[in-house]
Amino acid sequence: MKMPWSLRVARRIAELLLPPSAREYILGDLEELHGLWSSSEGRPAADHRYLKALFASVVAQRFQGPRTERTERGLPIDVLFDLRQVARGLRRRPAFVIVVALTLGAGIGAIGAVFGMANQLLLRPLPGVSDPSGGGFLVFSSGDRRHVGISGPLAEDIRRAATLLDGFATYDYVNVHVSRDGLRPVDVRAYTIWGEYFDLLGVRPVAGRLLGAEETGPDADPFVAVISERLWETLFNRSPDAVGQRIRANGHAMTVVGVAGGGFTGTDRSWEIDVWVPRSSFVPLTGYPAERLWSRESSLNQDFVVRPKPDVTFDAAEAQLNQILSSVMDGERAGEVAPLRATLHPGLNLGPDLRRAIYPVVGLLAAAGFLVLLIPCANVANLLLVRALQGRGEIAVRRALGASTGRIARRALLESLILGFLGTASGLAVAWLIGLAVRGERLFGLPGFDGFVVDARILAFACAAVVVTALLSGTLPAVVVVRFGARGTLREAEIQSTKRHSLLRRGLSALQIALSLTLLIGSALLMRTVSNLYAVDPGVDLEGVYIVTLEMGVQRREGPRLEALHRDLLSTVRSVPGVDAAALASFYGPYMGAPRGRIALSDPASTGPTGAVSHWVTPGWFELFGVHPAAGRTFRGSDWGPSARPPVILTAALANRLFGSTEVVGRLVHVGTRDLEEAEIVGVVGDLRLVDLRSAADEAYFQPYPPVQTDPIPVLVRVSETGPGMEDALQRAFADVAPDLPIPRPELLTTRVDGQLAEQRILMRLLGLLSILAVVVALIGLYGVVAFAAVGRTREFAIRFALGADGHRISRLVLQDGFVIVLTGVACGLGGGYALSRLLEARLFGVAAMDPLSYLAAVLMFAAIAGLACWVPARAARGVDPIQILNSE
Amino acid sequence: MALGELEQVVLFALARLEGDEAHGAAIAAEMEEHLGRTVSPGALYTVLDRLQDKGFVESWIGDSTPERGGRRRKVYRLLPAGATELRGWYAGIQRIAEGTLARLEALAEGTS
């Protein structure tokens, strides 16, 4: 009786799994019983019973069969025997093992690096937060504005009415200078909170207590604070006596009521919070008007976290929130064009904004990584196939000695598992190396990546990688081996007959070549870009220049006190040994934004002002940077006194734009941000790049201090020798002048420049590493395909040798095979390289997307190594013994 | 040597079958007919191998048939040692069950 295909497939699988000693009898009995059941119960019932009995038979034989001898620990002896045989076989072929391990390692390393970064930056649970999946972020939107603020009282109304929520809290970010008596102030980030913030996050105190909902509302004491463990260590050395002590925050005394435990630093991975204060503290800390803070008319820029009740879904909670909004909005927001809408984003591990930014990129990288993994697996499958066919004699002997198909297939799969394990080990090493390349760099604005760290999640990934690669790369060779085993015949016609598979393998090899050449071209372009960027002349001498940006905040000085501060800063810093020069700049100093001003020719009514970069500088600024005037002079001492017509200095780029020439000394212009005042051009300096090295020369003008915006105060210091000692000395000097202000660590301007170039640098490193991996994999694949084709033509070569062909002729035949694949791959790779260069175009600098030098270098380098990959099997083909081959037929 | 429950049942089934009929499919059919119990051939051969190791049964390879898809059957026969063991076990069951049938019926009907 012919069975349906599903039963036939099941029977085939059972055939592989049943022991040979009982297989025939069990399957025969089942078929006989199937006939009996069909007669008595009908065909469908019989099929169902057959399937059940088949499965039960396999289970009984596999796990209960007395014939399966086991070790004392219960491990099947035959499996252990196969494992030992496989390991012994691999030990005899170290080169093959190394090649396979490296190939798999390349793919696993690439995807492992992506996973490692995602794990560290996104997946690691937020410290101190329990059950992050039970809470979520609440965002209010209006029309096409994705994130709008609402007033404090409206938030409170929603909180009271949301009966499906267990917790509802809001928080707002504030910059705070925190100090303790006798200690230097530190700059930290704080949240002003309102609602069940700590309760719903499940944060526990490690000392004292945390602020409850009733301690954070309008009537709460504003001068209490919870601090982080980090700040507890900095200010109190983790002393339990910290609770009840006073700290100063933005000049106000606050009592520490507790320390948040578990390393909690807030729910935003982009930055770390060290202080939590009630919402009412917002007024004294920032000077914000109290009546506005609690008014229904003002919209505050605050964020929300909520936790639905245990048996309530996020959707239900969101629906209730929107109902509440609809009902309160009539009075609150009557007249709004678009109604308010509440959206709940489940999960506290990552905020909605970061999710929106990161998920697509990580998803793309993961897909690319998986693709990168597939290609080496296909490569290794190719290599294992070649080896299986080269070892076909051994398979025939084993089959003749009684080895079952299942046993032969099992051995092939065991081999793939071991190789998968080795590949995963080398892949973790590759991922670690890739991690080193981007270590410390801020990716997506998140705190620096610490390198590839192995934790439980990475280990789980590694185990999955072993299994997946073993299955992906081992299945095809195992199937081929089983087919050989089942047929019991081994003829080269088998190999020749799979023309479809041959085309697939060649196509895959050409694809790998194209992909690796694409990446190589991209790397070459980025390398030239980075090299060009570092060669850009900023027009100023940046070496040995520190910048320290003082933020006054609430301790702001004005008028004479501010002038005194400026004077004292410069005179004190200049007296530090090793300091050659010091000057003040404006805004945040070079390479940190571009303060814009307006400039117009002498008659603003007729020509109209245009925008330009505006700088305010103190005496010695130009000398500090080694900038000499191209025309006229730089500022001198008298320029800072009162004058009827203040002086201004232009860059050459601005002078050329306004006047078409740099011979403009003595001309009058109007400059300013809002109101323009007349100024006289006293000098022109050459091209400067103080905003962005990647852009054209700045069109900028310089005016003497003080600037319009007096906070922050960037202080520039040129030193003879950089180092931690100098940085300590500078910090101490600043602290002597302004003991009430936090003094950040001095930063070298060259470090800022490095930061600007970080994106190109990271891209260059990552692309460079990926291209090296891809090239290695592609060339191993090429070798595999050419070697496989050569093996398939062994009989042909033997005949040719017998007919008088020489070794070189045979080698040329093999090389031709490889040449076609390489040519196809290179042609596609050039197209791919062009496409990639168009994607990278915005990030290139000083090099065109179609830069012939980069393309040529990549192609030549690749062609040379590809030639080597083809030459090895070509050379091996010369060693074919025609007599042995033809005799074996 | 104690006999497991399934081993007893398989031996009884073997005692009912004769000659070439005593193979896996026939034993499974006997058990289903008399006990309403389904046992897969795989589990049966596990038990039969165990009984063979104990020396209670012996086997030989029979002919292939079209009903079996051309596969041969493995036929079993009860050996004297197996028959003795089963008889002794059955006698013991009978002794312990003697006189309890009426009480069992009453308990089953809930009248006791």
Image (cartoon, coloured by chain):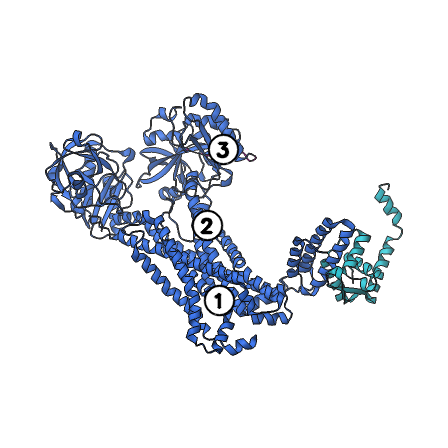
Residue A744 or residue B39, whichever sits in front: B39
Closer to the N terminus: mark 2 or mark 3?
3
Magenta: main secondary structure equals: strand
* Quadrant location, the C terminus of chain A: bottom right
Q: Is residue A856 left or right of residue A372?
A: left
Q: Which mark is residue A416?
A: none
Residue range in magenta is A303-311
Residue receiving disc 2:
A367
Residue A425, can we see it?
no
- Dot 1 falls on a residue whose secondary structure is helix
Q: Which mark is residue A789?
A: 1
Q: Residues within 10 Å of mark 3 (few under 14, many from 20)?
A: many
Residue type at the position of mark 1: Ala
Q: Nearer the viewer, mark 2 or mark 3?
A: 2
Chain letter for mark 3, please. A
Which colour denotes chain B?
Answer: cyan
Closer to the N terminus: mark 1 or mark 2?
2
- Dot 3 falls on a residue whose secondary structure is strand
Residue receiving disc 3:
A167
Which colour denotes chain A?
Answer: blue
Q: Note whether A383 is above or below A189 in the view shown.
A: below
Q: CA distance from mark 1 to mark 2?
A: 31 Å
The quarter of the displayed image where residue A663 is located? top left
Give how far across and how far down residue B18 sits, in percent: 84, 63
Chain letter for mark 2, please. A
Residue A680 or residue A446, whichever sits in front: A680
The quarter of the displayed image where residue A427 is located? bottom left
Q: CA distance from mark 1 to mark 3?
A: 67 Å
Q: Residue at x 40, y 41 (%)?
A: A228
- Dot 2 falls on a residue whose secondary structure is helix
